[in-house]
Image (cartoon, helix red, strand yellow):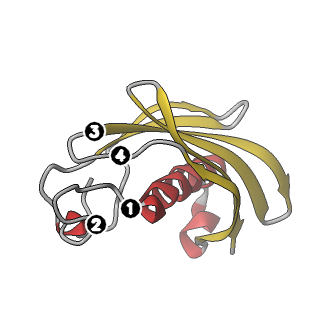
Amino acid sequence: MRLEYFQLIDRIIDLNLTDLTIRVEANVPTESTIFEGHFPGRPLMPGVLLIEGMAQTAGAICCRHIMSDELRTKQVFFMTIDKCKFRKPVVPGDQIRFEMRKLNQRRTMWWFRGEARVDGVLVAEADLSAMVA
């Protein structure tokens, strides 16, 4: 997890362009400035970064699906988050598996369902949307 570049995804495990699903890994660093105030004495991965990891994972599906010369002039923008739930804390040293599935697409808008798991246990879930512009 390289926060200086704000890249939360370390490795794509599986990408299926037929049903537009993706699984990626993200390693939570043991030492990072994000834990200094969140929380002193009991460091936890901020929930907003779990959502950002889902958004980056969904963005990877968009980019791989529409690979072309035209994509070089486009960007993927995070639009909405719905039905978000944080179920368990994520701590330094954990490895997160983000799993995203495309639900729908209308023109430039894409909708996804995402889950974050640590050791197979669901730690967060949300519905996200993005726009390619």
Residue at the spot 65% in from the left edge and 35% down from the top edge:
17
Question: Residue at image x 76%, y 54%?
Answer: 111
Q: Name which residue type carries label 4.
A: Val
Do the residues under discs 4 and 3 have CB atoms within 8 angstroms? yes
Work out how far the residue at label 1 is from the one at label 4, CA to CA, in angstroms.
8 Å
Instruction: Give the residue at mark 2.
Output: 38
- Give the mark nearer the N terminus: 2 vs 3: 2
Quarter of the view holding residue 132: bottom right
Secondary-structure class at tag 4: loop
Residue at the spot of label 4: 90
Quick one: quadrant of the C terminus? Answer: bottom right
Q: Nearer the viewer, mark 4 or mark 3?
A: 4
Percent coordinates x, y for residue 32 in the rendering: 16, 62
Mark 3 or 1, nearer chain start: 1
- Mark number for residue 94? 3
- Mark 3 and mark 1: Cα distance apart in space: 13 Å
Camera-nearest label, 2 or 3 = 2
- The numbered dot on residue 126 is none
- Judging by the rendered image, the residue that carries numbered circle 1 is 46
Whether the residues at callouts 2 and 3 have beta carbons within 8 Å, the answer is no
Please name the amino acid that badge 2 sits on: His
Closest to the observer, 18 or 79: 79
Answer above or below: position of 97 versus 36.
Answer: above
Q: Is residue 96 left or right of residue 61?
A: left
Using the image, determine if residue 90 lies above or below residue 121: below
Q: Secondary structure at mark 2?
A: loop
